[in-house]
Amino acid sequence: MSNNLRFKTSKFIDETYRVSFKFNNKTYFGFKGDTLASALLANGIHLVGRSFKYHRPRGIMTSGSEEPNAIIQLHDNSSRTEPNVRATEVEIYEGLVASSQNCWPSVNFDIGGINNLLSPVLPAGFYYKTFMWPASFWEKYEYFIRKSAGLGKSPKVADPDIYEHKYIHCDVLVIGAGISGIMAAKMAAKNGFKTLLVDEKSYLGGSSIYDNSEFSKINNQITSSWLEKEINEISKLENLEIKIRTSVAAFHGYNFLLARENLTDHLPINQRENKVRQRLLKIRAKKVITATGSIERPLIFDNNDRPGILLSSAIKKYIDLYGVACGENNILFTNNDTAYETAMSLIQRGIKINAIIDNREQIDSKISYEVEKNNIEIYKGYTVVDTYGYKKINKVSIMKLSKDGQTVIGDKTKLNCDCLGVSGGWTPAVHLFTQSGGKLKFREEDQVFIPSVYPSDQISVGSCNGDFVLEEIIRNTLSSIKKFLDIDNSEYKTVETISGLNQSKRNIWLLPSDKSIGKTKSFVDYQNDATAKDIKLALREGFRSIEHVKRYTTTGMGTDQGKLGNMHALGIISETAGTKMGEHGTTTFRPPYTPLTFGTIVGRNVGEFFDIFRRTPIHDWHVANNAEFENVGQWKRAWYYPKDNENMHQAVQRESKAARDSAGILDASTLGKIDIQGTDASEFLNRVYTNAWSKLAVGKCRYGLMLNEDGMVYDDGVTTRLGENHYIMTTTTGGAANVLGKLEDYLQTEWPELDVYLSSVTDHYATISVCGPNSKKIVSKVIPDLDLSDEKFPHMSFKNAKIDNIKCRVMRISFTGEHSYEINIQANFGKSVWEKCMEAGKDFNITPYGTETMHLLRAEKGFIIVGQDTDATLTPIDLQMDWIVSKKKYDFIGKRSLYRSDTIREDRKQLVGLLTENPEEVLEEGAQIVADIKKSPIEMLGHVTSSYYSPNLRKSIALGVVKGGKNMLGQKLIIPMENKNIIVTVADPVFLDKEGERLNAKL
Amino acid sequence: MFLINCPFCGEREQSEFKAGGEAHIVRPKQPTELSDDEWAEYLFMRKNIKGVQFERWNHVHGCRKWFNMVRDTSNDQIKAVYKMGEKPPVK
């Protein structure tokens, strides 16, 4: 640590607590309280990274979240490694490891630096212009472009840290704990408002907390002393919650804000275990007070990006807060009074100021006179035209500005320095305000955008509202808050301020040079290497909207989102185009204000909580019996049960055969179940299903098809009449929630007069389906008391029964075409009843089958699966299911649409069966169906929706939709595949047992 | 994110609700009497206003009740909420 650069007088630095850290594999020391940036500067290190495009050496430029250059990789090669972290925001801790990014082999010698020499052939839009042709080369270009794109390295393994989300509700949220924020929070909390004060820094007080100047006083005290007392007072207020290290990322409508609270990033790694690293706060505030301050503007001149060039306010902060000098031989370059505050801080510590270059001809403020008294040379009306020094600045050359500020005149003078502080005035931090939908207005006097129209119950105070002088800040904050909260100001009766600064400023967006603009590199966006020249080029090429210029030049598109240079980009555009500021729009500030980690966004929704799934009551049995699972909606369903070394095809063939030859068992618990009760329940079903329900006897079941109002098939399932006014409806697994929602919608909005009540009971029952020629024998063993004779218990009927005293409902319904029973029992008994069925079926080779076999078995019977064979463009007529559409009913959902001119077209896509010439050839689901492959373009007639090899029919079967397919029975069509054309014959979609003999067989 | 004053539950987060399109479109009582054009008018035609719009909303992760909302789509201000069957309180 260079002793010359560290002053042991800062109360924010704990000099007794030395901290060691590694940067680019070298060990350095800092103190507790340092940021990585201040510690590096104290060690004389300015060069920390390389720029994105030209790989130019870049140093620390700011002292906060606006930093464009000093972005580093934190935690090398560990699971915590994080790219693009701002060194100015990292609080150092023992063992910290950081490294430069975007450089190889090292930041000091970077091969990519060749791009800087190539820069004349790398203009704005270079990639767009160059890699457009020939188009077929794109894949080759892409490889190299991707390789050089992006900054930093992302971690390769899972994040070990814990993150969480938290809701906060408050009366007043104050964003920013600078002087305005502290005053606002105190006034709110003392007047009974439940208040939350947040600040992104690790300390309260903003830049005023280290303002020790004689030139800014409040009630005759040094500003920092006055503010410390205020902070001390508010920290005791009960109504006030204060959160530091908390950055508001987004300000949405209705005063809904997102903030990231950093909890452990400042701690050594070994102290972070089991602690939440970052918390995403979801804040709902009745009122919001934005006091986010302002960001100092750089100046735009040739080679304004060298390491050692910093914002003047940053130099002041490094001295006053961290006790670190950024250089030993300083030059300040300014167009306003701010730099003189920095000069006073340097003078107080005895640090050399070589010169002050001021754009202004006339300077008239107390503070500037004081600086002059210290024998510091001030070049009035001058500008810096160039800087020198590759890895660190060592010289500047200056020239006199012409009267209009558009050109430079006279001789060039060179001045030595090792640090250049620049100040172009201040830009209010209106990012959050505009995110919330606020409208800005442009203030001509000092060329700033300030809040104008508030979209919600909020207000901006302090310098983010365009008040830059202490006296104004305090006066306007007090009066605004008083009005905003509708309170008497008893907290701050008299506040008298003294300020040595004057508001005068000479704003020149792009400073002139003695070189032609084509030969200059005046950076507007430091991180993305966008220069003033690039912006002018974009305008010459016809771009006008700021949004287009931004994307073409990449100005403001880095991780810093152009916090420093966006204003200059706007200024240069308006100057060049000769238009008013803001006429070309201002770029939109989008959330997040500073980057968020993925961990913070995701919170606890990781691992098994990333996408939660539902399990049936029988799930554990499936797992224990080697089932493979399929996701159906949110459910995990048993897909097939491979035995020994079976693959999926072999398992499905075995299961399908067993179900038809003897007995199969399926877990159907996932089917949606809706309990429907009420005196109008029958009428309600009449209106929602296409078929008639009034005459369905108690104890009987019926299959129903539900349409959308546009006539397209929406859902299907069997509904059972349990009692006079009581039904239970089943829906598809995936459609359950939507069907309930749709039924509720009609009941509440169209037919409120109907006496009907709906409850979802999907999770309440386990459903076990036993099918096959031996199903009757098995069920009679499980429920011996139940009379299973066809007379007492025919197909499509239901019985109440008991298994070991537990009530259950048994339906004789079938989705396989086999004789089958569905046992519905309270969910927690599901697994034991399943096991009972397995035990009872042992002698009959009862075979558990999964969804794949279920699909195969129903396809043999030509039963549709809504969502697989249908896609919201098929009516029941298209599905050849005319039989289920009641001709007698006056109305049902979708009825009128079934005879719209479009739905009665003969050439609509219709569901048909498809048989291949070669019975072993299984079609691919989704394959296109055509008639004529010679025609160009080939007309697509439809596609295959379901396709299987049927072990029971010993041939390939498929369902598909084909234009006009109904009338094509027996016709040959072609399915063109990559290397062959498969000939298929259009067939009846029912492949097996059309007469239903299996279903009605006497067992 | 809106804060929606459900007429049955009070103020809740928008994430508890689902939007359901334009309000005050009544399903025809006698659809069979309608021409294709008249039926299409009911079935497909919806307004998409920049400004004050009448909408249906459902408190789907709450009381599951449908209700109506008057919302200015240009600035997302909710002017009123009212129950199904009630007349809109603002024009």
Image: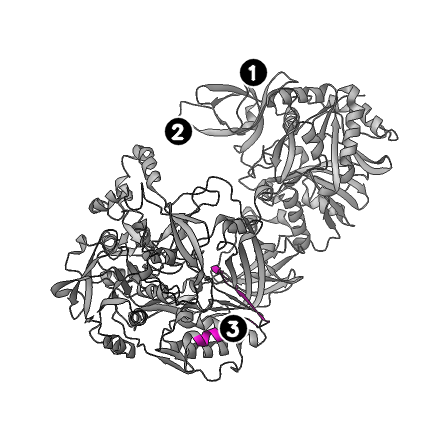
Contact check, label 2 and label 3, Cβ < 8 Å: no
Q: Are marks 1 and 3 on the same chain?
A: yes
A334 left or right of A952?
left
Q: Earlier in the sequence, mark 2 or mark 1?
A: 1
Q: Are marks 1 and 3 in contact (CB under 8 Å)?
A: no
Q: Which quadrant: the C terminus of chain A?
A: top right
Mark 2 crowd level (few <14, some 14–19, many ≥20, 10 Å Cα): few
- Which residue shows up at 78% across the image and 23% down it? A841
Q: Quick one: SS at disc 2?
A: loop
Q: Name the secondary structure under disc 1.
A: loop
Q: Is residue B49 visible?
A: yes
Residue B20 visible in the displayed image: no
Q: Left or right: where does residue A805 sit relative to residue B42?
A: right
Q: Quadrant of the N terminus of chain A?
A: bottom left
- Sort mark 1 into few (<14), some (14-19) or many (20+) by Cα contacts within 10 Å: few
Q: Left or right: A782 with respect to A741?
A: right
Residue numbers of the magenta segment? A225-254
| Label 3: few (<14), some (14–19) or many (≥20) C-alpha neighbours in 10 Å | few
Kind of residue at badge 1: Glu
Q: Where is mark 1, residue-wise?
A: A920
- Circle 3: residue type: Asn
Name the residue beneath numbered marker 3. Answer: A232
Q: Which residue is mark 2?
A: A937
Chain of the residue where label 2 is placed in the rendered structure: A
Tell which of A118 and A932 is nearer to you.
Answer: A118
- Element carrying mark 3: helix
Mark closest to the chain's N terminus, 2 or 3: 3
At a point 24% along the width and 75% down the height, the residue shown is A374
Chain hosting mark 3: A
